Structure formats: C-alpha cells, structure tokens
Image (cartoon, rainbow, N blue to C red):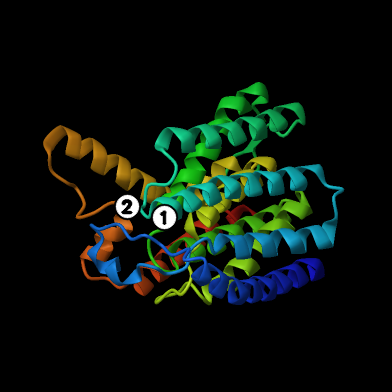
Amino acid sequence: MKEILIGLIFSFLLSAALCVGLIPILKKLNAGQNILHYVKEHKDKGGTPTMGGLAFVLAAVTVVLAAVGVGDKPLLVALAVGVGYLLVGFLDDLLKKKRADNLGLRPYQKIVFQLAVAILASVYCCLNGLTVLRVPFTRLEYDVGWWMMPIGIFIFVATVNSVNLTDGLDGLAGSVSAAFFLCFGVLISLQNGNGKLSLLSFCLVGALLGYLIFNTNRASLFMGDTGSLSLGGFAASVALFSGNALVIPIAGIMFVLSSISVIIQVIYYKKTGKRVFLMAPIHHHFQEKGYSEGKIAYAYAVLTLMAGASVLLPFV
C-alpha cells in the first residue's frame, strides 16, 4: 500500500511539473490542435497545445521504473505496449501539425501500426502463459490457450480506438481513464495478482490527475492521439496480463458507449441517410443538447467508477 501511495503521489507531481514545462514548448513549436469544422462548440479551441500525453505517460513510466526496475516482465511489456501506441499517436499528431489539418495518419496506416503492436502483445501472452480469462462477478477463470491470439488482438484494437474516440471534450478521456485505472488497480490488488500491474494502474491514475489540472474546461493542454492511443494500450495490457480482459466492457463502459454510438450512427446513416444522434460519438450529442463539457466529463467519470466498483462486489 505504501508503494502504491508513493507511486501515485510522485506520478501526480511529476506529471503536473512536466505539463507546466511542456505547454510553452508546444506553443513555441506551434503544436496546436486543429479543430474539426463541424464541431462548432470547439471553434475557439483552435491552437490549444496538444500531445500532452507525453507528460503523463512519461511521468507514470518514470515512476514505475524507478520503483520496480526492470525485473518484472509483464510490467515491462505493458510499458512497451503503452509507449508503442504513444509513438503511433505521436506520429499521427506530428502529421496533423505538418499538414495543418485533422487527418494525420491515413486510416489504413493507423490500423497497420495498431495491429502490429497488438499482434506482438498477443503473441507474448500466448508464449508466457498469460491466457487466463477471469469471469467478472465470480471467482471463475478459464485458460483459453492460443485462442488468446485473436481475442487479444481484438481487445487491443477495440480498446485503443474506443479510448481514442472518447477523447473529444475537455477532461473527458483523462477523467474516465483515471477512474478506469483506479478500478483496475484495486481489482488486481484484491485478486492478489501481479502487484506491479496494480502499481502501474495507480501511477497512471496519479499522472492523469496531474494532467487534468491543465485539461479540465477550459483546457490549456490536450492529450492528442499521443495520449489517447497510449492510454488504450495501457488499459488493454493491464487487463489482459492480469487475466481481467472481460472487465474492460464493464469498467470501460463509457469507452464502449463511444464506439457503439459511432458504429450505430454510421450504419444507420448509410442505410437511411438520417442520424440517430445529433453528432457522434455520443458525448457530442449531449453537448449539442446543451450539456456543458464539465458536466459530461463528470457524469462519464462517475458512471465509470460505479461500473468499475461493481466488479469488486465478490471481494466484499
């Protein structure tokens, strides 16, 4: 417990300090966010520094390595995966800046990079016996063997893109991710699982809280794809490597909601030419309905905490 609290506090302080130092650098480099023209509520956010994910990821990784070293293989692979997706997002953000638009990597390029990391991580799971799936709300677990390859690839790609889609309002992806990792940190600790993965979860919570000082409405720093893709990679890694992949749709219910709303909108529009939501992902629908970004982010985070807390019931 002492190690976890120290990790969380130092991650918070380091993340906040890195954000303070990163903002003027990003401004000097003109690394500002290009705003989508159809999101009229965000027209005054153009130019806000992005790639803030560099700060909280570096903070969490630094503190974890300082506390643990390089002796825990699942933890090191989880860090490598998170950093791998960070590099994909960083490249995407750099291309957006260079082209002065919101396109970045082409969809096929992004999915190729994402699949490459997902395949490597899933192969690692299969070769190292990390093939157990625990059933939420029970003490049951099943070893799926090499079926973890397709399962793992799907989970990585789905989680990474779902977190990415949730990053659309000030404080939204950061607060939801902090709630998500808090639930996973507690869950892994109660399961007496890999304590280092629990430490990583809590360090990510601390780092995200430090970043949220600068990201709550009105934000002075965005995480960019640099942050959102990395968070998705960390989320999938912590879940898979601890045997809790099936908990992702529960603790990550708001991530799932973002993806499902986009899928429904696209399919329905192609079939009928009409929209189910005023705008997708659904957090933009709520914004169009007049809800403030702060209220939406708060509601998303609370619902994530409640859903995540539900999987802890068997341990009460």
Q: Residue at x 54, y 36 (%)?
A: 113
How many numbered badges does the structure rendering display? 2
The earlier-in-sequence mark between 1 and 2 is 1
Identify the disc placed on residue 39. none
Whether the residues at callouts 1 and 2 have beta carbons within 8 Å, the answer is yes
Left or right: 232 as drawn, with respect to 265: right
Tell me where residue 9 appears, x and y as whole percent. 71, 74
**Residue nearest the viewer, comparing 59 with 209:** 59
**Residue nearest the viewer, comparing 189 with 45:** 45
Residue type marked 1: Thr
Left or right: 75 as drawn, with respect to 229: right
**Residue nearest the viewer, comparing 135 with 34:** 34
The quadrant of the image that shows the C terminus is bottom right
- The residue indicated by pointer 2 is 281
Question: Can residue 219 be seen at all in this image of the molecule?
Answer: yes
| Disc 2 secondary structure class | loop
Question: Can residue 155 be seen at all in this image of the molecule?
Answer: no
Q: Is residue 209 above or below residue 285?
A: below
Tell me where residue 184 appears, x and y as whole percent. 62, 55
- The residue indicated by pointer 1 is 166
Residue type marked 2: Pro
| Disc 1 secondary structure class | helix
Q: Is residue 112 above or below residue 206?
A: above
Q: CA distance from mark 1 to mark 2?
A: 7 Å
Q: Residue at x 12, y 36 (%)?
A: 272
Tell me where residue 142 appears, x and y as whole percent. 65, 31
Q: Residue at x 36, y 60 (%)?
A: 34
Q: Residue at x 73, y 73 (%)?
A: 10
Residue at the top extreme, as displayed: 146
Res 271 → quadrant: top left
Q: Is residue 173 above or below residue 132?
A: below
The crowd level at tag 2 (other Cα within 10 Å; few <14, some 14-19, many 20+) is many
